[in-house]
Amino acid sequence: MSASAAPGGGVILLIDDDPSHRSFLGRTLGYMGYRVLTASSGPEGLALARRERPGLVLLDLMMPGMGGFEVAERLREEGFAGSIVLISARDEAEIFERAARLGTPLLVKPVDLDALLSAVAWGVRPPP
């Protein structure tokens, strides 16, 4: 787990098992003024979300052990009030449909910077 503190902006939790993806997205969002928390697994991300209550969770779909859908479902079951955006390397209709049923947007890797910025603008709000 790591956090890059940045003045202003909201708190974003980035959960992704790929260190290069975590680093790139974390740095990019940190430069924009967001406080970015990172986790490399679903269980680590759940613990951080419970403790830090971020306004937005950016969540990799395919992770070993506990995948993104399971993490998103648990967050919602536990009453997480922030926004969730899923990120996937797979561009398949059934994944988009499942994300839609959860009420979560889905970005496809490699993540387009404009799409990322739109998702962040949509999802970041002060934590309750």
Image (cartoon, grey):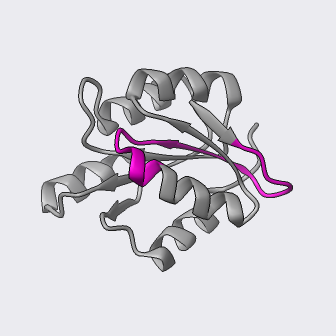
Q: What residue occupies the far right of the structure in this picture?
A: 7
Foreground residue among 99 and 50: 50
Q: Is residue 112 above or below residue 15?
A: below
In the picture, measured across the screen, residue 83 lies left or right of residue 69, that is: right
In the picture, measured across the screen, residue 97 lies left or right of residue 48, that is: left
Verify whether residue 24 appears in magenta.
no
Place residue 118 in its image quadrant.
bottom right
Q: Residue 34, percent across and down?
A: 72, 56
Verify whether residue 17 appears in magenta.
yes
> How many labels, in total?
0
Look at 41% across and 53% down and name the residue there.
21
Q: Residue 10, percent across and down?
A: 74, 52
In the picture, measured across the screen, residue 37 lies left or right of residue 42, that is: right
Observer able to see residue 47: yes
Place residue 66 in its image quadrant.
top left
Q: Residue 27, percent across and down?
A: 60, 58
* Quadrant holding the C terminus: top right
Q: Is residue 113 above or below residue 127?
A: below
Foreground residue among 102 and 72: 72
Q: Is residue 17 above or below residue 58?
A: above
Observer able to see residue 85: no
Look at 33% across and 38% down and name the residue there.
68
Look at 40% across and 44% down and name the residue there.
19
Q: Residue 69, percent across and down?
A: 31, 37
Q: Is residue 90 above or below residue 112?
A: above
* Quadrant holding the N terminus: top right
Q: What residue occupies the far bottom of the structure in this picture?
A: 114
Look at 40% across and 59% down and name the residue there.
105
Give the magenta part as a residue range: 4-22
